[in-house]
Image: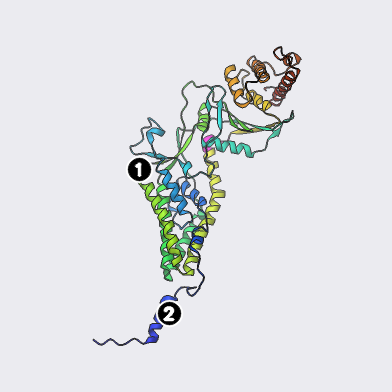
Amino acid sequence: MYIPEIPETVQLQGRSFATDSSPLANATFMLNSMGVAGLLGGEEAMSTVALAQIYNKRKWSGWYNTPGSYIIGKRFQRLTRSVISDSHVNPGSGASFGTVHIDPALLLQHDGWSKGPVFKGIYSGTSMHETGPLASLLTKKCIRMPGSKVEGRKTQPVNVTIVELEPNPNLQPQMRFHHSSPFCAIIPIAVSLATCAICGLYGEWYAFSMILLGILARGLTCAFIGSGKLVFHHPKPADGSPPGDGILGCDHELVLLKGHENVVNAITRGRFFFSFQSKHTCRLVEMCSFLLIAQAIAQLICVPQSNLFGQLMFVFSIATSWVYNLWFLSYDKVEVREEIFRSVLGSPKLNKFVFPNRSSAIVSLLLFSNDDGGLPGDPKKLKKIMDGFLPSGALVWEIWKGIVIEHLTNGRPLHFDETHWNHQDLPSQTDRLLLQTLLKDAEMAYSASGGNQ
């Protein structure tokens, strides 16, 4: 069979179309592989993955190439060690076999889901060294709001916020949250698909495969996280429990919680979990972690093999995703936290005062908690609370606490004269002067609280 010889000019033209089909194919400049991998961070991308459970249909809006796959993959490795069964979270719940829970704080370490400050119950005598994420959110909310300044002896100011918690009939031992997915979530998806298609059209197969791998890795991860639910658990108080009033302490930021024990428990003991119905959750977490880390390694190797045009398409896809993640981190996530806060606590009434010293601030907290004219708790519990926030052991301070607690116990106004500070157990004039100063601080706190109303 005779095969005609192809002219050399035709061969040269064929090679020209194969090698120069994409724009910038003859460019000598190439992006450094480490520069491409480290161009954008991954902390912002973590939030959009972790909060996929809160949004309606959000698990289907994560199909786009995004930076930070290595960071997300390492975080997912930690999740395998935090998986716990439903019986440990909610004993006797009767949940279906195979339900497991994951602590979301491992994915949301920098998003305000940290543990809250210490809590001391006034009536119950409860003392907790750390509280739940709702206590952290409430404390930060109190720190940001302005307060009314109280005149008096100035040392180091202490902020006191009175939080009146309203009864919430919708507050359940287990709660789930839903939020509408933002419309602009389609932008990074469209850009990733468009850049992937353009790379395929011009034969930039390295860039094409890496963008496609990024889309699949993130999409599958969001689909897995979104298959679960963000659940809020808190213990139900026993019948006949004392009022839940107590003090959240955060150095110079003190918060008095006033309300039903059920609502206070939600703040101090409530925890969030990612809840999954599948008993194979650990394997799915490991698979997502492996896929994300493999994606990061593959991008380091394959993206530099592409031409400049393919590299620019890859960078443009992750840059668009990074901008979207930043927007989500600064706006959407704050809105989600506020909605969760309102769902659990409603709209509590907040009143903030700035006291000029710590002793007057602590006395005011005890006065504000005294609604019915009786003593909140008993003298021993009050003494324990005062010891937790004020110096203890010194004779002057112990005498001052005893005098204040005695007045509160008997329902007497906090007005003092020289018969109180010229105490027989204080022979030193210096100690008596300090006691007088502290008693004046208590009087000032009594006046600021409206004479105990």
Amino acid at the residue labelled 2:
Ser
Report if residue 346 lies within the magenta region: yes
Q: Nearer the viewer, mark 1 or mark 2?
A: 2
* Quadrant in which residue 397 is drawn: top right
Residue 249 at x, y = what percent?
59, 31
Residue 217 at x, y = what percent?
41, 55
Where residue 16 is drawn, which disc sits there? 2
Label 2 secondary element: helix
Where residue 278 is drawn, which disc sits there? 1
Q: Is residue 150 left or right of residue 271?
A: right
Label 1 secondary element: loop
- Mark 2 packing: few (<14 Cα in 10 Å), some, or many (20+)? few
How many numbered circles does the render carry? 2
Quadrant location, the N terminus: bottom left
Report if residue 344 lies within the magenta region: yes
Say which label, 1 or 2, has the lower sequence index.
2
Where residue 22 is drawn, which disc sits there? none
Marks 1 and 2, how far apart in space? 54 Å
Q: Note whether residue 230 is visible.
A: yes
Residue 223 at x, y = what percent?
41, 50
Residue at 54%, 38% (x, y): give it: 342
The magenta segment is 342-347
Residue at 48%, 69% (x, y): give it: 309
In the rendered view, would you say 382 is above or below 316?
A: above
Quadrant location, the C terminus: top right
In the rendered image, the residue lying farthest to the front is 428
In the rendered view, would you say 235 is above or below 59?
A: above
Amino acid at the residue labelled 1:
Ser
- Mark 1 packing: few (<14 Cα in 10 Å), some, or many (20+)? some
Residue 441 at x, y = what percent?
71, 24
In the rendered image, the residue lying farthest to the top is 424
